[in-house]
Amino acid sequence: MRIRTPGKIQEQLWLLGREESGVYLLKGDDGFTMINGGLSYIIPELLQQEEIYRSTGDIDVVSKKLVSYLYDKNPDYFLTPEIFLEVYRQMVRHIASAMEGKD
């Protein structure tokens, strides 16, 4: 579930701030904690990675597609595709592990 509107989410959990730069306030019996929620703008990319992984089940295929998408949008990016391939492999490996309940 993606929460977009600040306010109470459920008992003892609130979203404060804005959708793009929010903070979650989690209250417990002995105190509270604030959790940074300011990276909501990356959610569409994470969902895309999950969707591609679900359709292929192959970490290398997903990583190569993501590199291709990145360089289609940013052909003059200063890092090489080989570097991003390794970065994406690590990210997708983590996502796959979490999706399979191993993380």
Image (cartoon, helix red, strand yellow):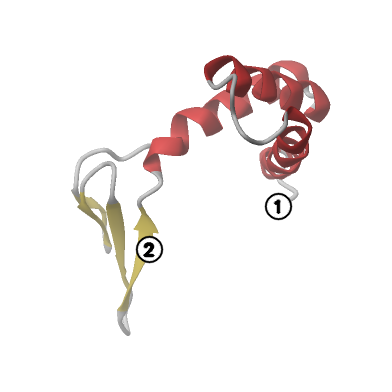
Q: Which x, y percent locates residue 46?
A: 54, 33
Mark 1 secondary-structure assignment: loop
Mark 2 secondary-structure assignment: strand
Q: CA distance from mark 2 to mark 1?
A: 20 Å
> Does any portion of residue 1 appear in the rendered image?
no
Q: Which x, y percent locates residue 79?
A: 67, 36
For marks 2 and 1, the one nearer the N-term is 2
Q: Which x, y percent locates residue 34?
A: 33, 68
Label 2 amino acid? Ile
At a point 38% along the width and 63% down the height, the residue shown is 35
Q: Look at mark 2 in the image and give the residue it sits on.
A: 35
At a point 75% along the width and 38% down the height, the residue shown is 83
CB atoms at circles 2 and 1 under 8 Å apart? no
User: Camera-side residue: 87 or 36?
Assistant: 87
Q: Which x, y percent locates residue 17?
A: 20, 53
User: Camera-side residue: 50 or 85?
Assistant: 85
User: Camera-side residue: 31 or 90?
Assistant: 90
Q: Dot 1: few (<14), some (14–19), or many (≥20) neighbours within 10 Å?
A: few
Q: Look at mark 1 in the image and give the residue it sits on.
A: 103
- The answer to which quarter of the image holds residue 82 is top right
> Does any portion of residue 78 appear in the rendered image?
yes
At a point 53% along the width and 18% down the height, the residue shown is 73
In front of the other: label 2 or label 1? 2
How many numbered circles does the render carry? 2
Label 1 amino acid? Asp
Q: Dot 2: few (<14), some (14–19), or many (≥20) neighbours within 10 Å?
A: few
Q: Taking 103 as reference, is 22 left or right?
A: left
Residue at far bottom of view: 30
